[in-house]
Image (spheres, helix red, strand yellow):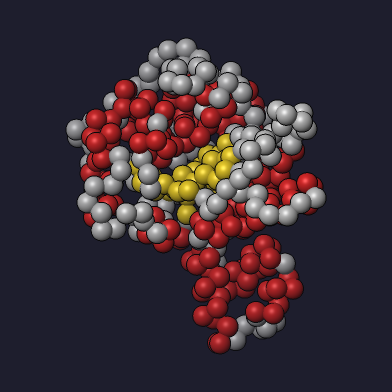
């Protein structure tokens, strides 16, 4: 039984989600077409610019991203508390920033009145919605690409796929999986050469930033944050080391690798070394709508009316026995 989108994305279970969207046509619509030789790499910059713009408007932060030739990945964090702190005027201003002042003017008078408040709460909720975030991202890129190609019709294969990330191990596994995409596909040899990814973005920013601040629109690590704000619970250096040593292990069926080693930080995540590699190598293969320890998966499944979500057996072998429910 497939879970409906409304059940797959449940902010009471987790605020972290891995999302993926693929192009519908066979040619490399976001890269270089191998048959015609036409270069579409500028569309990758369209995607990155648009996702960062939306992250500054929505109450949604980007933890990781990778834009490939015919698909892209995002790891997103929904900051519901941030949306609750916005005034009604700010909610309307943010909505206008996406859809333009004309559409917002039709929905709301210049002065807020009682009868408009329910509508404003609907917009506040939409500004925390991953579905609306992905819609605003994908529709924009599809329109630009179809205009450039002088054609009509679908650009994306369908609605985006999503996985709930139920614990820190799941979040970092998904982030590493996303950041290592170019290396696994042998497009890049190292993380610092992996253009159009969040790890490349972070490394380039770090080289030129003496204050050690996070890049624009990317969620900070625990050593990049200056206040008690949402962040990734690991130091940036530790994450770099984790990605680097993971990338040194060859993935079956994929040509790219670096060398060979394991990272000690896995103990903090409740994962075994072999289990970490299994998850990062097979994140989309072994797990479906959620990713985490067997206890967290079981709890998530029960809440959705499913006692055995896909990935239970793999999680049982990947996480250390002491891993607790998040």
Observer able to see residue 202 = no
Give the vertical position of 150 relative to 105 (above or below). above
Occupied quadrant, residue 12: bottom left
Residue shown at 69% from the left, 79% from the top:
106
Residue 236 in picture, x, y percent from top left = 49, 31
Looking at the image, which is closer to me, 207 or 185? 185
Hey, which residue is sitting farthest left in the picture? 321
Give the vertical position of 273 relative to 118 (above or below). above
Q: Is residue 18 left or right of residue 275?
A: right
Residue 41 in picture, x, y percent from top left = 72, 35
Residue shown at 67% from the left, 36% from the top:
27
The quadrant of the picture occupied by the N terminus is: bottom left
Q: Is residue 117 left or right of residue 302?
A: right
Total residue callouts = 0
Looking at the image, which is closer to me, 177 or 4? 4
Q: Is residue 300 left or right of residue 129?
A: left
Residue shown at 23% from the left, 44% from the top:
295
Give the vertical position of 323 relative to 189 (above or below). below
Hey, which residue is sitting farthest top in the picture? 259
Residue 7 in picture, x, y percent from top left = 37, 59
Occupied quadrant, residue 196: top right
Looking at the image, which is closer to me, 148 or 322? 148
Residue 165 in picture, x, y percent from top left = 38, 45
Residue shown at 36% from the left, 40% from the top:
287
Observer able to see residue 320 = yes
Occupied quadrant, residue 306: bottom left
């Amino acid at each position: 039984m497939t879970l409906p989108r409304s059940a797959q994305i449940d902010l009471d279970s987790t605020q972290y989600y891995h999302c993926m969207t693929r192009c519908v046509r066979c040619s490399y619509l976001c890269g270089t077409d191998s048959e015609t030789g036409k270069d579409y790499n500028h569309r990758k910059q369209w995607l990155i610019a648009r996702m960062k713009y939306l992250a500054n408007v929505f109450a949604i932060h980007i933890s990781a991203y990778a834009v490939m030739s015919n698909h892209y990945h995002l790891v997103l964090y929904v900051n519901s508390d941030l949306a609750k702190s916005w005034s009604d005027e700010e909610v309307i201003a943010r909505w206008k920033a996406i859809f333009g002042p004309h559409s917002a003017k039709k929905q709301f008078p210049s002065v807020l009145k009682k009868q408009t408040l329910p509508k404003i709460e609907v917009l506040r909720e939409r500004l925390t919605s991953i579905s609306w975030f992905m819609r605003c991202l994908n529709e924009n890129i599809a329109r630009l690409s179809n205009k450039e190609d002088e054609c009509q019709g679908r650009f994306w294969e369908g609605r985006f796929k999503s996985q709930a990330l139920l614990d820190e191990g799941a979040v970092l596994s998904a982030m590493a999986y996303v950041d290592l995409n170019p290396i696994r596909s042998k497009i890049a040899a190292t993380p610092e050469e992996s253009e159009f990814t969040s790890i490349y973005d972070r490394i380039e920013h770090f080289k030129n930033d003496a204050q050690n601040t996070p890049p624009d629109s990317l969620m900070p690590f625990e050593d990049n944050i200056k206040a008690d704000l949402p962040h990734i619970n690991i130091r940036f250096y530790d994450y770099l080391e984790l990605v680097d040593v993971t990338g040194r292990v060859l993935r079956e069926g994929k040509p790219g690798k670096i060398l060979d080693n394991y990272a000690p930080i896995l103990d903090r995540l409740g994962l075994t070394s072999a289990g970490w590699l299994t998850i990062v190598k097979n994140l989309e293969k072994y797990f479906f709508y959620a990713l985490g320890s067997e206890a967290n998966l079981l709890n998530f499944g029960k809440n959705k009316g499913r006692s055995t979500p896909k990935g239970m057996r793999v999680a049982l072998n990947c996480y250390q026995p002491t891993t607790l429910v998040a």
